[in-house]
Amino acid sequence: MGDGSSPSYGESLTSGSKAGLGGLMFIQFLVGIFGNSVILYMFWKFKQLQTPSNIIFISLLIANLGMCFCIPFSAASMLAGSWLFDSAGCKFYGFASMFFGLAVIGLLACLSIDRYIVICRPSLASSLTHSHYTYMSMAAYLNAVFWAIMPIFGWAHYDEVGTSGCSVDWTRADAPYISYLFSLFMVCFVLPIVTMVFCFGRTHTVLVMRQQVQNIGSRDNLSPVNSDWANQKQVTQLGVVLIVIFILTWSPFAIVCLWGALGDPQSIPLWLATLAPFAAKCSQFLNPLMFVVLIKRFRDYAVVMLCCRTHVETIELTPSAAQDDRNEGEL
């Protein structure tokens, strides 16, 4: 999503605050580009990671990179104290940031659905192919395109906001803006949260039941092409962390949108209007970081690549590694 703060908020920021926020945005850009590029290269380098379900993760990394490339526009404008680009640049930035941001949200929901299918519906998971996961990822991108392009065609409008960027002008109180912002809030924030909570909640229940009968992580119950994630001990913790990150990073912007649609936009606190766009951009480097930190298989491949090792087979084929996988599958 695009940045969101009214012009009066942008003018209220001191020069020092603008410089600090601009600097932090450039740090977000550098960290996000590095983290997502490293992991994306890891998927390309190690064929063992190119499983059907990981297509969603690859799509998420691409969307994260798209968000990263939007940051320099707002960061440079924040440092300069005013929007540096013309109206065409404003529309491009508004569309791009909205598109990639919504794609990230949609793909996170797809990941939760994937975990639900693999853990709770193993017979269905065994029939899924690369094409199925490609279609799922495309659906997330098409949903993002729809909501991002609507302001260009007249349902709401992209406009300069504050000094750091362009987005849907949620400070306006007319019917098109209110209907767009409310619909956006329900479809692209509430619905993904409900989906993730249900899917990961159900997944957690099934994992607990399998633990009680000591058969969790059995490869016989999982599709071979998807066992890459499902035998990891931390899969449930990862789901909870992704939900928490999603809520923490996107809630400020969602609150600003809903406040602008249903309340008085001018009453939105300065700290909330300033925090919203910055917090939303934090997700683009936190998501891949959590996958590496919490999932052993991804962590092993990342270490192999960063240490310039060439024989990734030592991770998957050594007895100790195989035993580690089995142990992690037994919670």
Image (spheres, helix red, strand yellow):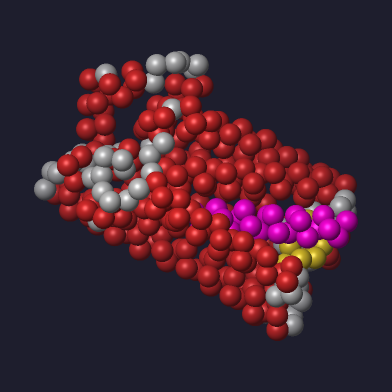
Foreground of the two, 125 or 322: 125
Query: Magenta span: helix, strand or loop, mainly?
Result: helix
**Residue range corresponding to the magenta coloring:** 86-108
Q: Residue extending furthest bottom?
A: 175
Q: Residue extending furthest front?
A: 131
Instruction: Give me the residue at 41% from left, 36% from top.
Output: 50
Left or right: where 330 falls relative to 37: left
Left or right: where 5 falls relative to 11: left
Foreground of the two, 153 or 259: 153
Query: Residue 68 location, x and y as percent?
Result: 66, 44
Instruction: Give me the residue at 72% from left, 46% from top.
Output: 71
Query: Residue 238 location, x and y as percent?
Result: 39, 46
Q: Residue extending furthest left?
A: 213
Instruction: Give me the residue at 30% from left, 55% from top.
Output: 117
Instruction: Give me the residue at 80% from left, 65% from top.
Output: 159
Residue 10 can be seen, yes or no: no
Q: Can you tell which quarter of the image residue 203 is in?
A: bottom left
Query: Residue 120 location, x and y as percent?
Result: 25, 55
Q: From the image, which quarter does the N terminus lie in?
A: bottom right
